[in-house]
Image: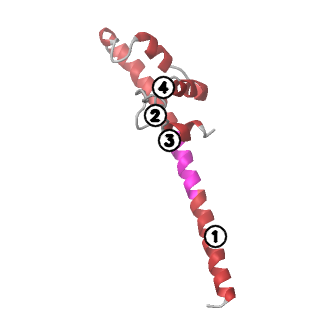
């Protein structure tokens, strides 16, 4: 294999890595969008449930925690995360073990 052929191969590899990188970024954006959508659907679902079954309002979390969870926008999500809750699709609303960062939560927070 001569030098030119090797150079061509490296260039082509570089191009393919660039394409993969673009694809990965696109998927990350879609993931962030889905997590955010899930967040709003979760809240909407909760509100609808409250309206349908007011007697069952207590549910899993104390009222104070519940209030913390209802809110809008990135800042609220960041605060939720700081307060020790998952904001990611996989574990949304559940408590993170102390000092335990979640990659899904972090990748969502660092989007924007
Ligand atoms: Zn998480």
Label 4 and label 1: CA atoms lie apart by: 40 Å
Q: Residue furthest bottom?
A: 2
- How many numbered circles does the render carry? 4
Q: Is residue 80 magenta?
A: no
Task: Determine the residue positioned at 45% across, 24% down.
Answer: 43
The answer to which of marks 4 and 1 sits earlier in the sequence is: 1
Residue 100 rendering spot, x and y as whole percentages = 47, 34
Mark 4, other Cα within 10 Å: few <14 / some 14–19 / many ≥20? some
The residue pinned by badge 2 equals 38
The answer to which of marks 3 and 2 sits earlier in the sequence is: 2
**Are discs 3 and 1 less than 8 Å apart at CB?**
no
Residue 73 rendering spot, x and y as whole percentages = 58, 27
Q: Is mark 2 within 8 Å of ligand 1?
A: no
The magenta span reads: 23-34
Label 3 and label 2: CA atoms lie apart by: 17 Å
The residue pinned by badge 1 equals 14
Residue mark closest to the camera, 4 vs 1: 4
Q: Residue furthest front?
A: 99
The label shown at residue 103 is 3
Residue at disc 2, secondary structure: helix
Task: Determine the residue positioned at 52% across, 34% down.
Answer: 36
Q: Is residue 27 magenta?
A: yes
The answer to which of marks 1 and 2 sits earlier in the sequence is: 1
Task: Please indicate whether residue 24 sits to the left or right of residue 5 in the image.
Answer: left
Label 3 and label 1: CA atoms lie apart by: 27 Å
In the picture, the quarter occupied by the N terminus is bottom right
The residue pinned by badge 4 equals 84
Q: Main secondary structure of the magenta part?
A: helix
Task: Determine the residue positioned at 41% across, 38% down.
Answer: 90
């Amino acid at each position: 294999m001569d030098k030119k052929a090797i150079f061509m191969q490296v260039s082509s590899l570089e191009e393919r890595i660039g394409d993969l990188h673009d694809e990965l970024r696109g998927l990350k954006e879609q993931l962030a969008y889905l997590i955010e959508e899930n967040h709003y659907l979760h809240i909407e679902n909760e509100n609808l449930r409250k309206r349908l079954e007011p007697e069952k309002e207590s549910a899993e979390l104390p009222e104070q925690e519940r209030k913390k969870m209802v809110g809008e926008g990135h800042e609220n999500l960041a605060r939720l995360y700081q307060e020790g809750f998952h904001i990611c699709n996989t574990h949304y609303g559940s408590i993170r073990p102390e000092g335990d960062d979640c990659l899904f939560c972090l990748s969502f927070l660092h989007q924007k």
